[in-house]
Image: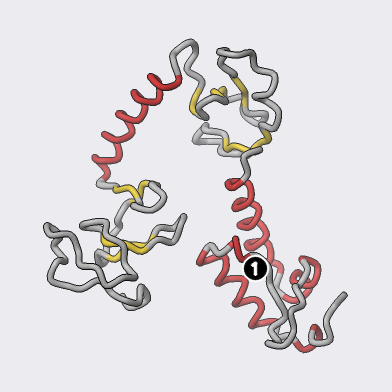
């Protein structure tokens, strides 16, 4: 049921709110409520679509879909760099005989993956050994690019410029690029950090 305030909701405000959620990747807070403080009505997809412009809605809808696909254990992304499509693997491991590797192929490009380790298909090679070899190659490649892991979620991040205050695009963690110490506390930088003489900002927005 549409709330009594629906006809008076500011379309521009809702549009900006949706854009902010996409920019800040706040998809775990996907629900949009009526802007009236005393109303707790959650706007439906149909209601939101009727309020904001088609372009903003599509951006939000696509981003929300990708968020849920990445969070789901029933879907994986094809590892082929020219594909990257998500597809369902629900039930793929249930029929596997004990000790037997499971090869699956992307339904879009036929790229073969190992469902045990979610890596490119490696034949009879042990998953752990193959992972170790691939990780060593990846680490060398990452080091050559000057990338570092997010201290919270581990995703590799490249620094394109600017100050040493970094924010991970995936988990939104704020940290110092030089020493990887978290922002948002009264802690000092690491003893060997170039920013040691500066206290870490209490408010991550002040940078």
Residue 140 lies, with reference to residue 35, above or below; the image says above
> How many numbered discs sit on the rendered protein?
1
Q: x, y percentage for residue 84?
A: 56, 38
Q: Residue furthest right?
A: 1
Q: x, y percentage for residue 159?
A: 30, 56
Residue 73 lies, with reference to residue 8, above or below; the image says above
Res. 132 image quadrant: top left
User: At 55% across and 13% down in the image, what residue appears?
Assistant: 99
Residue 36 lies, with reference to residue 188, above or below; the image says below
User: At 79% across and 87% down in the image, what residue appears?
Assistant: 5
User: At 67% across and 29% down in the image, what residue appears?
Assistant: 107
* Quadrant of image for the C terminus: bottom left
Front residue of 55 and 33: 33
Colour scheme of the picture: secondary structure
User: At 80% across and 67% down in the image, what residue appears?
Assistant: 46
- Say left or right for 202 vs 6: left
Res. 164 image quadrant: bottom left
* Quadrant of image for the N terminus: bottom right
- Say left or right for 134 vs 39: left
Res. 26 image quadrant: bottom right
Q: x, y percentage for residue 44?
A: 78, 68
- Say left or right for 32 vs 151: right
Label 1 neighbour load within 10 Å: few <14, some 14-19, many 20+: some
Residue 114 lies, with reference to residue 68, above or below; the image says above
Q: x, y percentage for residue 109?
A: 62, 28
Front residue of 103 and 108: 103
Q: Which residue is mark 1?
A: 56
Front residue of 34 and 47: 34
- Say left or right for 184 vs 28: left
Q: What element does badge 1 sit on?
A: helix
């Amino acid at each position: 049921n549409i709330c009594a305030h629906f006809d008076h909701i500011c379309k521009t405000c809702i549009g900006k709110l949706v854009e902010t959620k996409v920019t800040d990747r706040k998809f775990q807070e996907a629900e949009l409520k009526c802007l009236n403080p005393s109303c707790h009505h959650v706007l439906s997809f149909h209601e939101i679509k009727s309020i904001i412009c088609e372009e903003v809605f599509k951006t939000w809808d696509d981003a929300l879909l990708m968020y849920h696909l990445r969070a789901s254990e029933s879907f994986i992304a094809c590892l082929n760099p020219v594909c990257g499509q998500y597809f369902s693997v629900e039930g793929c491991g249930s029929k596997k005989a004990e000790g037997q590797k499971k090869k699956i192929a992307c339904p879009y490009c036929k790229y073969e993956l190992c469902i045990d380790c979610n890596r490119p298909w490696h034949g009879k090679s042990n998953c752990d050994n193959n992972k170790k070899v691939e990780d060593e190659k990846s680490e060398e490649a990452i080091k050559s690019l000057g990338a570092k892991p997010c201290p919270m979620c581990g995703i590799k991040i490249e620094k394109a410029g600017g100050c040493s205050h970094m924010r991970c695009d995936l988990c939104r963690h704020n940290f110092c690029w030089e020493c990887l110490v978290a922002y948002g506390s009264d802690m000092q930088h690491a003893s060997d950090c170039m920013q040691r003489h500066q206290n870490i900002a209490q408010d991550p927005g002040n940078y």
